[in-house]
Amino acid sequence: MAKKNIKNIKKDFPIFKNVKVHGKAFIYLDSGATSQKPKMVVEAEANWYKKHNSNIHRGAYQLAEEATELFESTRSKVASFIKSKSHENIVFTKGTTDGINLVAQSWVKHNLKRGDTILISEMEHHSNIVPWQLLAKEKGFKLKFWPVTSDGKLDMTNMNSLFREVKFLSLIHVSNVLGTINPVEEIIKKAHRKNIKVLIDAAQSVPHRPIDVSKMDPDFLVFSSHKMLGPTGIGALYIKPARHKEVRPYQSGGDMILEVKQQGSTFKPVPGIFEAGTPALAQVFAFGKAIDYLNSVGMQNVLRHEKSLVQYAYQKLSAIPEVTIYGPKPANRSGLVSFTVKGIHAHDLATFLDKEGVAIRAGHHCAMPLHHKLKIDATARASFYIYNTKQDVDKLAKALQLILKQWQSSINK
Ligand SMILES: Cc1ncc(COP(=O)(O)O)c(C=O)c1O
């Protein structure tokens, strides 16, 4: 695919042509929740049914063999996108949440003992909290929270005592609220020295920056296609080869077996053991096209573009006296800004902004414990992706100024 210039790609996304909000141009600043899709991804899903549809791993006819080849070549695309040495380390899941639940039920459940500790951080998404709470209760594991500092970073001051008795660490790479980029490579190295196995929730990092699992060395890493230009209902789990033989089946049924007898069954190795039943074929195919698209832009360019947008947004928003921004300074944050505006609840803010055509997220962003820690019930979040421009940020800042003006004049009436 020809290289794309990031400055000129909004036109590849049909939604920006098709949608007007309250008669205004649609400014989408909620890619942290889900990304928009380029035309080639939208078309790929339909093309699967028009040109390729048949089940995989079973038919002996030409179309079925081609379908299997397309499915497996997408696995290889995902592997090279995150620099996995082999496609065999990549399991297709329904997304990040599914991947975390899979690791909880198929590895952690069987490799930890009653009384062992699972460590997660105070900045986790609910997807990386609730599965561990349920598992800890069921199996008698302890659940410990890694504290977050007042400037929104992991407290790295006393890692020896933090890691004591910990057998498993499940950690967010990039915070979906604070934009904090956790130093996962350094943390994984330290954890492995203490024989702690590590899962990385890469839902907010794989879509936005180059990822190299061979350097990062996590035991498990999970992400979702829908946050990286691909369809919903599909995602990937990377499993390091050293963990392959330690897993048990998660779900069972067709296609994950080697042999089934009345007395019992044997199972395929990773990844096949985790892909019971007919997978989301059209979605996998379109996920591959999303990866092609991102590769044609270049992940270093994606990162550079978002850095410049977040820097600009930080500067614009912090110039408004009523705005408080949460998390690290722009040099150390990913492409999102969560903030509050004095006197206006985040939900009211989102409703006002929508009237101006600007879509942001408001609420706890599936991170209630983090909001409790920050002593706020809700924040507004603007999150950026490759199709956003500085003009989009200008529209957000202008709309905020307008809202504040209207709000203040309504109070003074
Ligand atoms: C950091 C993080 N983890 C997990 C998830 C859950 O992802 P999904 O809903 O695709 O399973 C999200 C989604 O917002 C997220 O931001």
Image (cartoon, helix red, strand yellow):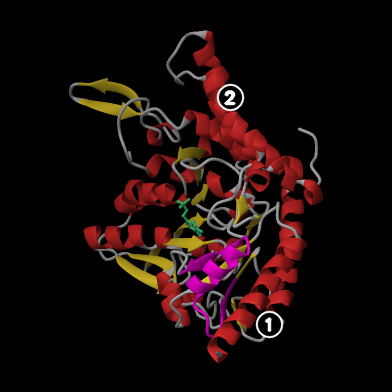
Query: Residue at position x 52%, y 47% from top?
Result: 224
Is 244 colored magenta in this rendering?
no
Question: What is the x, y in percent for residue 258?
Answer: 35, 23
Q: Which kind of residue does numbered mark 1 sit on?
A: Ile
State how far apart marks 2 and 1 are (Cα).
47 Å
Query: Residue at position x 54%, y 72% from top?
Result: 349
Label 2 crowd (10 A; few <14 / some 14-19 / many >=20): some
Using the rendered view, name the quadrant where residue 173 is placed: bottom right
Query: Residue at position x 60%, y 61% from top?
Result: 185
Residue 84 shown left or right of residue 317 in the figure = left
User: Which image quarter is the N terminus in?
Assistant: top right
Residue on which the image places disc 2: 47
- 35 or 277: nearer the viewer: 35
Label 1 crowd (10 A; few <14 / some 14-19 / many >=20): some
Question: What is the x, y in percent for residue 49?
Answer: 52, 22
Question: What is the x, y in percent for residue 164?
Answer: 40, 72
Which numbered dot is residue 239? none
Residue on which the image places disc 1: 320
Q: Residue furthest top?
A: 61
Q: Which kind of residue does numbered mark 2 sit on?
A: Asn
- 342 or 291: nearer the viewer: 342
User: Which image quarter is the C terminus in?
Assistant: bottom right
Q: Is residue 146 among the parts visible in the rendering?
A: no
Question: What is the x, y in percent for residue 175?
Answer: 55, 65
Q: Residue furthest front?
A: 413
Q: Nearer the viewer, mark 2 or mark 1?
A: 1
What range of the chain is rendered magenta?
A: 338-363
Q: Is residue 49 above or below residue 305?
A: above
The residue at label 1 has a CB less than 8 Å from ligand 1 = no
- 300 or 317: nearer the viewer: 317
Q: Secondary structure at mark 1?
A: loop
